[in-house]
Image: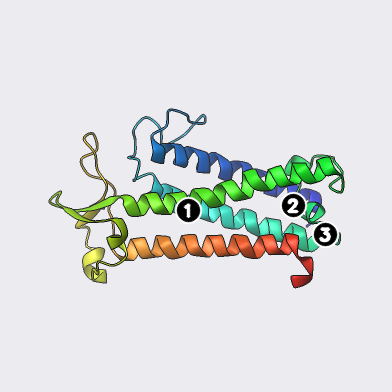
């Protein structure tokens, strides 16, 4: 696969990932700001409930983006990190100049660092939410999501849901203990993979 094609694929994934990262982040903070077409606006989900969509969706998109980032870095023989990092929209600039390195640094900040920070925020916000039993009684919240044991059969029995407010009496079905651990390990893996792929850009001799 040629580098121009990789740049096009990378650009598409980067823009889509940033779009969902901003929209989910906005929903978790209940900001008025939202990008056009945001499926989480207008109170359709609660601030904590938005993380149930952000963690898996943004995580998958981020993994795909990082994979293309690594492919591009491995396909580029140049030793400069700026040349090894994908070019947004195949823009024509010299990555060896000060302006070119600044453009690549800005691109990395917006399309790599921001989504990584969003994943951390989503996990923290998720853990701060509350799981409820079917009788609307609070069951667990905070870090106890990771420590309060629930058997696998009981957890997936449909007797729990996550988050609620005055307008949404019952939130999405929820699997206590297991779902928080799956989300936590998923975010840890995504962040580790981000570090792994960025190393391929910064330190080509390691790969």
Question: Disc 1 or 2, which lies upstream in sequence?
Answer: 2
Is residue 110 something one can see in this rendering?
Answer: yes
Image coordinates of residue 148 in percent, x first then y, are 25, 66
Q: Quadrant of residue 140?
A: bottom left
Q: Quadrant of residue 92?
A: top right
At x 64%, y 57%, the residue is: 66
- Callout 2 crowding tier (Cα within 10 Å): few <14, some 14–19, many ≥20: some
For mark 2, give the secondary structure: helix
Question: Disc 2 or 3, which lies upstream in sequence?
Answer: 2
Q: Which mark is residue 61?
A: none
Q: Quadrant of residue 203?
A: bottom right
For mark 1, give the secondary structure: helix
At x 36%, y 52%, the residue is: 126
Q: Which mark is residue 120?
A: 1
- Callout 3 crowding tier (Cα within 10 Å): few <14, some 14–19, many ≥20: some
Q: Nearer the viewer, residue 28 or 155?
A: 28
Pointer 2: what residue? 6
Pointer 3: what residue? 76
Is residue 207 something one can see in this rendering?
Answer: no
Image coordinates of residue 94 in percent, x first then y, are 87, 44
- Callout 1 crowding tier (Cα within 10 Å): few <14, some 14–19, many ≥20: some
Q: CA distance from mark 1 to mark 2?
A: 27 Å
């Amino acid at each position: 696969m040629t580098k121009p094609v990789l740049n096009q694929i990378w650009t598409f994934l980067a823009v889509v990932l940033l779009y969902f990262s901003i929209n989910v982040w906005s929903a978790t903070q209940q900001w008025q700001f939202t990008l056009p077409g945001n499926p989480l606006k207008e109170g359709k989900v609660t601030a904590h409930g938005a993380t149930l969509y952000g963690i898996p969706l943004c995580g998958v998109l981020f993994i795909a983006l990082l994979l293309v980032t690594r492919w591009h870095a491995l396909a580029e023989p140049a030793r400069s990190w700026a040349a090894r990092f994908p070019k947004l929209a195949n823009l024509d600039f010299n990555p060896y100049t000060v302006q070119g390195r600044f453009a690549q640094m800005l691109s990395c900040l917006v399309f790599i660092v921001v989504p990584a920070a969003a994943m951390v925020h989503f996990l923290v916000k998720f853990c701060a939410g509350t799981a409820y039993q079917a009788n609307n009684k609070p069951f667990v919240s905070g870090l106890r999501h990771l420590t309060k044991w629930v058997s696998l059969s009981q957890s997936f029995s449909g007797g729990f849901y996550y988050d609620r407010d005055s307008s949404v009496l019952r939130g999405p079905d929820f699997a206590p203990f297991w779902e928080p651990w799956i989300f936590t390990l998923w975010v840890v893996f995504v962040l580790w993979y981000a570090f792994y792929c960025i190393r391929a850009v910064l330190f080509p001799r390691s790969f």
